[in-house]
Amino acid sequence: AYIIGYPDGLVNPEGNITRAEVATIFFRMLTDEARDKYWSKTNNYVDVDSTKWFNNAVSTLSNMGIINGYPDGTFRPNASITRAEFAKIAVSFFKDHVRETMGDKFSDISGKWYTEYINLAAELAIVNGYPDGTFRPDNSINRAEAMTIVNNTLRRSPHKDHLLPEDDMITWPDNLESAWYYAAVQEATNSHEYQRASTDDTEQWTKELPVRDWAALERAWSEANSS
C-alpha cells in the first residue's frame, strides 16, 4: 500500500492530489538501491525547506531528475498537479524506453512541452485518455486517476472480482464497488500477496499484509543517510 487514507476514514478518490503528495507516493516506490544512490535532504526550491514533511521526497526525486519546479524557483507543493505533469513524472521512470513516438495518441496534446511524455506514456500503457479522444493535459488529476497511473507504472493489475473478501482487506466508505476506480483504489491502499491469473494476467489476491509505517521508515532512511 502506498496510499494512506485521511483521519476521517475516507480516501477521497475524486479529490485533487497535490504535488507534494505525488512526490511522496513515488518516493515510497523507489527501490532501496535507488533511494541510497539519490538520497537528498536539500533542494533549490524557495518553498520547500527542511522542516516540511515532504522535503525528503521532493529533494530525492529532484536529485534523480524525476520531478522539477517552476522558472520562478518554486515547487508549489500544495498546488494540484495536472494530468500532463503526472504523466511526465510516471514516464520518467522508463528512461531506457524513451524514443521517438509515431504520431500523437490524443487530439489535444500536439506541439506542447508534454507531447513526447504523454505519447510515450500511452505507448507504455501507463495512461489513458477519454472517450472523445482527448487527454485533457491541463486538467488537475484526481486521486483515483493518480492511483490508476501509479498502478500501471508498477504493472500492478487489480481486478474487482479477484480481491479479498471485504472483511479481509481495508475498505473505504467513499470507494464504492460500482465506481470505475474501485479496484485501483483498493490496490493502492492494501498491502497484499497475489498470484497472476492465467487467463488475463490480473492479480488474484491471496493474503492481506500489514500496511507499512511509512513515517517510521522515512525516519530510518533519513538517519541512515544523514551520516
Image: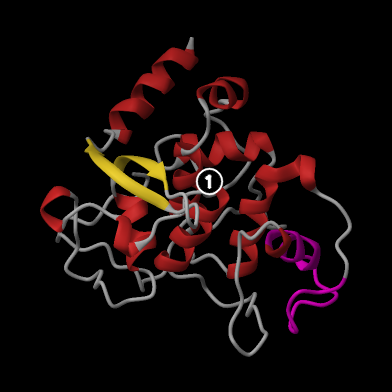
Q: Residues within 10 Å of mark 1 (few under 14, many from 20)?
A: few
Q: Position of residue 76 (x, y in %)?
A: 53, 58
Q: Can you say whether 140 is above or below 218 in the image?
A: below
Relative to 204, does residue 86 appear above or below in the rendering? below
**Left or right of 99 on screen, residue 94:** left
Residue ranking furthest to the bottom: 132
Image coordinates for residue 21, horizontal then vertical, percent: 43, 52
- Disc 1, SS: loop
Quadrant in which the N terminus is drawn: top left
Q: Quadrant of residue 165?
A: bottom left
Q: Residue at x 49, y 9 (%)?
A: 227
What residue does disc 1 label? 154
Could you say which is closer to the camera, residue 135 or residue 97?
97
Q: Which residues are magenta?
A: 103-121
Magenta: main secondary structure equals loop
One can see residue 53 in this view: no
Please, which residue is most extreme toward the left here? Answer: 167
Q: Amino acid at mark 1?
A: Leu
Can residue 101 be seen from the camera position used here?
A: yes
In this view, 94 is above or below 166 = above
